[in-house]
Amino acid sequence: MIVALTGSSGFIGRIIKNALEAKGNMVMPVRTDAGCIPNNIDCLIHCARAHKNLIEPITEEKWIGEFTTDVILPYFYTMKVIEANPWLNNIIFISSIYGIKVPTVRPIPINYLVSKAAEIYLSKVLAVNLAPKIRVNCIVLGGVESDREVAQQTQEFREKYSAKTLLGHMVLPDEVAGAVKFLVSEESKGMTGINLIVDGGYTV
């Protein structure tokens, strides 16, 4: 299977790329803000994310940047990809639980929260508009455990976050990979317009 993946160089994107390639799929890194449209693909995965800073003030520029990255560019890019790939039959959005739940462990910028909510809704609208030929689903991720500095995951934060989940831990990279491999595969062929929530029970 040939998969086009936006955001392939990011933390989540690398998890997805490695997992799909390990299963024998060909993954094509693409950018929604670039003019290059891939051909001969079976699946499009949107994983591009705007950088979110938890400290600096929220500006109008950050609002526009986040919404553009999460909603506007994915929509127009998707339409172009569909036009160039009449055999495309699967689209997957990677979003966040903060699009369906206001965070309580630590503050998250409001522009990120609202944009993620819109991204999830976009996936549902596309599922309706593109049915029955193309199925569109959204993987809604909880906090994914990471030792990256930008993730700002102190031991205290991990303990507080994990205590709010039913499984007692943050989402692990292999759990992200499992959800993606499922939605890419024919085993999920009866699913469209759904939010596949991978959060260890955080939002229950």
Image (spheres, rainbow, N blue to C red):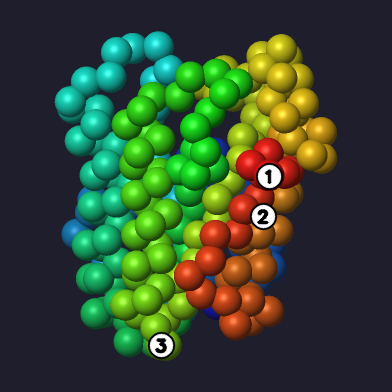
The spot of residue 179 in percent (x, y) is: 66, 59
The spot of residue 63 in percent (x, y) is: 24, 31
- Seen at 55% across and 18% down, the residue is 106
204 left or right of 192? right
Q: Which amino acid, mark 1? A: Val
Q: Secondary structure at mark 1?
A: loop
Q: How many marks?
A: 3
- Seen at 29% across and 37% down, the residue is 66
Q: Which residue is mark 2?
A: 177
**Alpha-carbon span between mark 1 and mark 2:** 22 Å
The spot of residue 27 in percent (x, y) is: 50, 64
Which mark, residue 133?
3
Splitting the image into 4 quarters, where does residue 139 fall?
bottom right
Marked residue nearer the N-terminal end (1 or 3): 3
Q: Which amino acid, mark 3? A: Lys
Marked residue nearer the N-terminal end (1 or 2): 2
The spot of residue 133 in percent (x, y) is: 41, 87
Q: Which residue is mark 1?
A: 204
Q: Secondary structure at mark 2?
A: helix
| Nearest to the observer: residue 141 or residue 4 | 141
Callout 1 touching callout 2 (CB < 8 Å): no
- Seen at 37% across and 76% down, the residue is 128
Q: Is residue 176 above or below residue 50?
A: below
**Alpha-carbon span between mark 2 and mark 3:** 25 Å
Q: Residues within 10 Å of mark 3 (few under 14, many from 20)?
A: few
